[in-house]
């Protein structure tokens, strides 16, 4: 399975989600591909925000090697599952989809841990709540991976 994590800048939430899911995949010996992208292009080529890197390091995870890129329509073909961090990301990605098969790949990531609650991962770029983001993403990635074991 190929999974793409999507947020706005691809320097905070989606690279954290990528790192968390990658770790769980290797722990369970699954043969999945994971990547991340941003709907915006301001940070293309940049490593994750240093605060995101630090929040991940607390849990023993290193995401310093990731580099930001922008979501593109090609991603609808390359990935089976496109997981958005908040409602704005979800709307932006859905608007880029032309076909129902593409739209069906797009899901809010917190629907896994909090079904029916329509929760979004708060943007930590301005409020610094990186550990809260970690906990939300870890909970959802755990439910996601368990549903495939
Ligand atoms: P992210 O956070 O979408 O979780 O990567 C943000 C990063 C940068 C900006 C906004 C959110 N920005 O406005 O540059």
Image: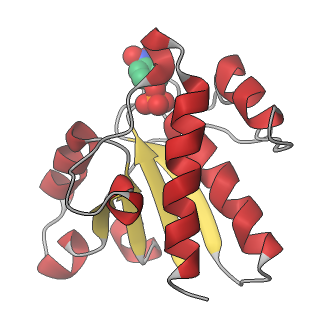
Residue at (48%, 46%) from the top-left corner?
A: 37
Seen in the picture, residue 114 relative to 99 is either above or below; the reply is above
How far across and down, in percent of the image, does residue 14 sit? 52, 43
Residue 20 can be seen in this image: yes
Q: Is residue 54 left or right of residue 119?
A: right
The residue located at (48%, 17%) in the rendering is 125
Tell which of 108 and 143 is nearer to you. Answer: 143
* Residue 93: x %, y % from top left: 24, 52
Q: Which of the 4 image quarters holds residue 134?
A: top right
For the C terminus, the image quarter is bottom right
- Relative to 1, does residue 127 appear above or below in the rendering? above
Of 34 and 136, the residue lying toward us: 136
> In the visual, does 88 lie left or right of 130?
left
Task: Check the image and name the residue furthest to the right.
Answer: 60
Above/below status of 14 relative to 50: below
Task: Point out residue 92 in the picture as x, y percentages from the top left corner.
Answer: 20, 45
Left or right: where 26 falls relative to 46: right
Which of the colour schemes (rainbow, by chain, secondary structure, one colour) is used?
Answer: secondary structure
Locate residue 71, reporting x and y percent: 40, 49
Residue 1 can be seen in this image? no
Which residue is at a point 44% across and 42% down the rendered structure image? 70
Q: Quadrant of ligand 1?
A: top left
Q: Residue at x 64, y 61 (%)?
A: 21
């Amino acid at each position: 399975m190929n999974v793409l994590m999507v947020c706005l800048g691809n320097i905070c939430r989606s690279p954290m989600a990528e790192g968390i899911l990658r770790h769980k995949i290797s722990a369970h010996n699954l043969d999945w591909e994971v990547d991340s992208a941003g709907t915006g292009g301001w940070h293309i080529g940049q490593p994750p925000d240093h605060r995101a890197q630090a929040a991940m390091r607390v849990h023993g995870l290193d995401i310093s090697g990731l580099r930001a890129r922008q979501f593109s329509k090609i991603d609808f073909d390359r990935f089976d599952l496109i997981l958005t961090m908040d409602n704005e990301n979800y709307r932006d990605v859905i608007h880029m989809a032309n076909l129902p098969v593409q739209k069906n790949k797009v899901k809010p990531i917190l629907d896994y841990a909090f079904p029916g609650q329509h929760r979004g991962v708060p943007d930590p770029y301005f409020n610094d709540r990186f550990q809260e983001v970690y906990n939300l993403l870890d909970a959802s990635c755990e439910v996601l991976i368990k549903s495939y074991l």
